[in-house]
């Protein structure tokens, strides 16, 4: 069976794309073979995290490549689609041809969002691209993942309730809290599963199993052709 492609997309910088990508990739790699594609050159924080990890520990079932442009992205996805169980793509914080291609190539586009109205507004354009991509790839699933969530605050609950309607996107039931563990574990080349914060650990395990269940239910579809992806990337 071909790899499931999960992307982390959000034009807002610092939303949590790379943090989520590293944590979910590592959790999936406990039982599956996972390839990560870093598209955020030259910031390359995912690659930096992987290099720190690789220097200190033995990494199994988890590889990384860096795609600097659309043709490299296409090549890495196509060359590896039958060699891995999951391909996770870390997006960059802009809407570009590359971001459009990442969305179309995905089985699941995960959109990290913090519960603020301003951030919901700035996600509108991305939601439109998802909608456009779903016309070509009806199996594409997109989900908001609430990050830095403030529990028991009315404003957060209200934003969550309204965002789903405004963006016409569903969300994951698991919400990630604002926790230093995400920051500190990443800087040490680790994940929250390897850190001393039980709440963060549970969040990532629960989110990863939300994702697995969603993908198991999804019908198997073929990857879109190189031509289709190129055309969509250019907005044609
Ligand atoms: N739930 C969280 N709690 C606390 N800190 C978090 C959380 N999620 C992310 N962060 C921190 O916020 C910063 C930005 O996160 P991250 O780099 O994952 O965002 P990004 O969307 O990949 O950013 P960019 O668009 O610049 O690539 C990092 O320092 C990260 O450790
Ligand atoms: Mg990033």
Image: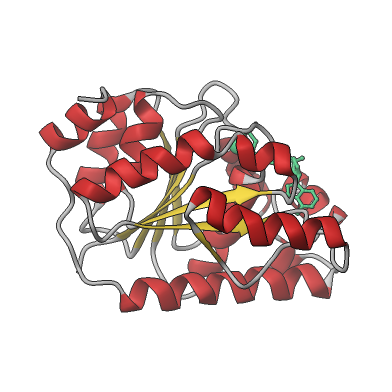
In the visual, does 175 lie left or right of 106? right
For the C terminus, the image quarter is top left
Q: Nearer the viewer, residue 54 or 33?
A: 33
In the visual, does 33 lie left or right of 81? right
In the visual, does 70 lie left or right of 61? left
Q: Nearer the viewer, residue 29 or 177?
A: 177
- Quadrant of ligand 2 in image: top right
The percent position of residue 103, horizontal first and vertical second, equals: 36, 43
Q: Can you say whether 208 is above or below 135 in the image?
A: below
How was the colour assigned to the protein in this rendering?
secondary structure
Residue 9 shows in the view: yes
Q: Residue at the location (65% across, 48% down)?
A: 113
The percent position of residue 180, horizontal first and vertical second, equals: 86, 53
For the N terminus, the image quarter is bottom left
Q: Residue at the location (45% across, 32% down)?
A: 39
Residue 96 appears in which quarter of the rendering?
top left
The percent position of residue 5, horizontal first and vertical second, equals: 34, 55
Count all numbered tags in the image, as a single digit: 0
The percent position of residue 233, horizontal first and vertical second, equals: 27, 28
Q: Residue at the location (71% across, 36% down)?
A: 118
Q: Nearer the viewer, residue 195 or 53?
A: 195
Q: Residue at the location (35% across, 33% down)?
A: 100
Residue 48 shows in the view: no
């Amino acid at each position: 069976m071909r790899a499931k492609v999960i992307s982390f997309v959000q034009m807002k910088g610092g939303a949590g794309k790379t943090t989520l990508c590293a944590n979910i990739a590592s959790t999936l790699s406990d039982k599956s073979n996972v390839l990560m594609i870093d598209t955020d050159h030259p910031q390359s924080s995912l690659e930096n995290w992987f290099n720190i990890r690789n220097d200190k520990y033995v990494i199994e079932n988890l590889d990384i490549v860096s795609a600097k442009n659309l043709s490299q992205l296409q090549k890495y996805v196509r060359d590896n689609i039958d060699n891995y169980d999951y391909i996770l793509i870390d997006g960059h914080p802009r809407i570009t041809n590359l971001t459009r291609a990442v969305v179309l190539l995905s089985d699941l586009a995960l959109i990290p969002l913090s519960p603020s109205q301003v951030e919901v507004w700035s996600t509108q354009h991305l939601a439109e691209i998802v909608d456009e991509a779903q016309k070509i790839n009806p199996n594409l699933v997109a989900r908001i993942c609430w990050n830095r969530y403030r529990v028991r605050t009315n404003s957060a609950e209200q934003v969550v309730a309204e965002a789903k309607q405004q963006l016409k996107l569903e969300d994951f039931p698991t919400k990630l809290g604002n926790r230093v563990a995400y920051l500190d574990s990443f800087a040490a080349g680790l994940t929250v599963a390897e850190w001393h914060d039980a709440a963060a650990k549970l969040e990532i395990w629960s989110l990863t199993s939300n994702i697995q269940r969603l993908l198991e239910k999804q019908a198997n579809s073929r990857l879109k052709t190189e031509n289709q992806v190129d055309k969509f990337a250019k907005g044609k």
